[in-house]
Image (spheres, helix red, strand yellow):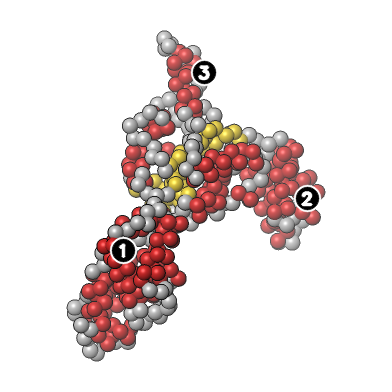
Amino acid sequence: MNRMKQAAAELASLSIYHGILNRTVPKALYRLLWADTKETFLNAWGEFFAVLCERESSENFAGHLTSTALYDENAFSLASAAGNVDFSSCMQAAVERDLEIILDLSRLTPDDLLQSCGFSDLPPLPCWETGEPVELLRGDAKTCAQQMAQYYQKNGCGMYARYRAFIWRDKRILPVAHPDKQRMNQLKGYEVQRQMAIDNTVAFLKGYPANNCLLYGDRGTGKSSTVKALLNEYYPQGLRVIEMPKEYLMDFPYLVDQIAEIPMKFIIFIDDLSFSQQDSTYAALKSVLQGGLAARPDNSLIYATSNRRHLLRESFSDREGDEVHQSDTIQESLSLADRFGLSINFMLPDKVRFLEIVDQLAYQHDLKEYIPLLESGAERWATIHGGRSPRVAQQYIRDAQAKLSLGKSLDD
């Protein structure tokens, strides 16, 4: 059997790692290896080289192909991620065989295929560089399998190993390729509030009792930023965040079905939460938090942000209505917030605290020599831009940085 046909048979025979054939580069390689006419071979060659270029892998084919194994979700990677390393001898042998095949395929060169394709008078074709496999797949098959198991146990598997942030849309969990890079050390003020969120999250990650969390209060105080920063601080410990827009809360049972068996820890993030009296999703979230049949799995918590402590919008007419059991109506409007075990209040800072935040940001951005000027202009900026808040302070400091970079005065 020539090299091309041998490689085609190997790729087709993958078992545990058969799922990599759903990835773009292995799928294109599969079509190329099985091309049986000159026309299909040339078309497949062009397609394969194009997808390598799209993924910036034309100079490291081996690195890209072997990396697909890192993110494959299969029986071995799922079990390893869950901490189960007691595999049957059959599965262990299959894993080692598949990794040997993937490594062998990663060594394919353009010359290997051109010399064994069986087609003559081919035009000049673009060629890729083989490169090197990923670090975890260097060595014998047994060592590689052990290293992969350790990788999955630390990083998870499937798309949850490759990505940290996700969004729920069209009844699917979709990865966010470029999540917000907010870090805790970039947030100024509200140390007590953030520590409450940190402690709850760390307890959750360690398997201790933890609560669903409502971060509520004034706009621009860093509620959403706190959740984003938690993800960026703790994703190496297995934390993942799935943002669920409020309008999709009725889909909650579908979401938990998809993550219940995943050996990671998930925060289901609902941003800017509030409801009107006629909002059908109100009852859905209430059921999710406590008492519904679609129970929240142990590997997930709900973190929500809101500008309101009592999430249901309520008017004076609601309290003065003609309902017989008026107190029941009022209690209903308050009951949802009470179902969050942890409620953290973010209030707008006073003048002193606002200037402290400005000073901290100035130190962070190497502007400490300008602090007197920054403080004198901070109140004026806050008055023009909607009041004192950490968000306004950050905007003020960014404006100051821009002016200084352009050689302008802070008084301009």
**Depth-wise, is mark 1 or mark 2 nearer the camera?**
1
Which residue is situated farthest in the bottom direction here? 121
The residue that appears at 32% across and 86% down in the rendered structure is: 111
Crowdedness of circle 3 by 10 Å Cα count: few (<14), some, many (20+)?
few
Residue 182 vertical placement versus 337 (above, below)? below
Instruction: Name the disc covering residue 316, or none.
Output: 3
Closest to the observer: 86 or 386?
Answer: 86
Mark 1 or 2, nearer chain start: 1
Closest to the observer: 248 or 97?
Answer: 97
**Where in the figure is residue 177, as x and y percent of width and height?**
45, 57
Total labels drawn: 3
Crowdedness of circle 2 by 10 Å Cα count: few (<14), some, many (20+)?
some
The residue that appears at 24% across and 78% down in the rendered structure is: 6
Residue 194 vertical placement versus 112 (above, below)? above
User: Is residue 271 visible to the viewer in this orientation of the structure?
Assistant: no
The residue that disc 1 covers is: 92
Closest to the observer: 227 or 120?
Answer: 227
Question: What's the residue type where badge 2 is placed?
Answer: Ile
Local secondary structure at mark 3: helix
Q: CA distance from mark 1 to mark 3?
A: 67 Å
**Where in the figure is residue 132, as x and y percent of width and height?**
43, 76
Contact, mark 1 vs mark 2 (Cβ under 8 Å): no
The residue that disc 2 covers is: 371
Q: CA distance from mark 1 to mark 2?
A: 62 Å
Question: What's the residue type where badge 3 is placed?
Answer: Phe
